[in-house]
Image: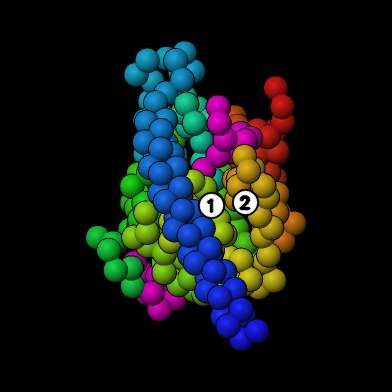
Amino acid sequence: RRKRDAVRRRVSYRWFSFLRRHRSAWKQVMGGLFEVSGRAIADLRQPGAKPAGAPKRIGPELREGFLRLARPADIVVTRHDDALSNWFLPGHWPHAALYLGNRTELAALGIEPRSAHGNGPWFLEAKKDGVRVRDAAETLEVDAAVLVRPPAIIDAGAVLRRALEHEGKPYDFLFDFRTADRMVCTEVVYRAYHGIGGVGFHLTETGGRLCLPAEEMLDQAMDHGFRVVATAGAGPGGLLSGPAAELAFHNSRQPF
């Protein structure tokens, strides 16, 4: 009987090892295919969505006004009106980034960003080149943005320290939140906030994968006491704050 059990364990181990190797190989192949297509789509624009050569609605002046309202650990969700990826991502608001603040604000939280140059302000953002600390001018080179603030109970320093642990990781073209070796934009927010101050994000199955689309993240954040502070490019007047921003944000999500 001992010999039979030993043989059974050996066969079971070899079968498990076989499955693990082949699953890993499948993931590498699919990851490569999704990366090629994802990189291509990220650079493509919808024909006719905007006039040729039209600038982004958020210019330098609007960007500066928006940043004056931002605080470290705020979430910023953005939109390019002509991005081809809008066809594949659910909702009006497809992309998210985490606001870090400037060097003075981060120093007050005991944080020194290891790869940032100058004095900021910066965002931590996952794009096709990976999770990086980016200048505000890069992150906000968009047509519209909404600034979302966590409840006061949230420890901004704890959120940002957790988020910065993922700096430098590659982009996850498979959109698989079950592992943290590669990340998408909303996963940076998810990993930073999940479990802090009572915040608990629930992953949803989208396209056969467990993930957190930006629109779903916004809904769940609001359920946990996050609030809209400002919008830029999302309504009349360019920069809006307070109730006007909340209304513009709400209207932007209505079906046409």
Please say whether residue 88 is one of the residues in the magenta stretch: yes
Residue labelled with disc 1: 176
Q: Which mark is residue 163?
A: none
| Image marks 1 and 2: residues in contact by CB distance under 8 Å | yes
Count residues near mark 1 (Cα–Cα under 10 Å), then give few for <14, some for 14-19, many for 20+: some
Disc 1 marks which amino acid?
Answer: Asp
Horizontal arrangement in the rendering, residue 4 relative to residue 41 (left or right): right
Q: Nearer the viewer, residue 243 or 10?
A: 10
- Between marks 1 and 2, how big is the CA–CA gap? 6 Å
Disc 2 marks which amino acid?
Answer: Leu
Q: Secondary structure at mark 1?
A: loop
What is the span of residues highlighted in magenta in the rendered image? 87-111
In which quadrant of the rendered image does the N terminus lie?
Answer: bottom right
Horizontal arrangement in the rendering, residue 52 relative to residue 82 (left or right): left
Q: Which mark is residue 210?
A: 2
Residue 94 percent coordinates (x, y): 55, 39
Q: Is residue 72 above or below residue 37?
A: below
Residue 103 percent coordinates (x, y): 34, 67
Q: Secondary structure at mark 2?
A: strand
Residue 236 percent coordinates (x, y): 59, 29
Count residues near mark 2 (Cα–Cα under 10 Å), then give few for <14, some for 14-19, many for 20+: some
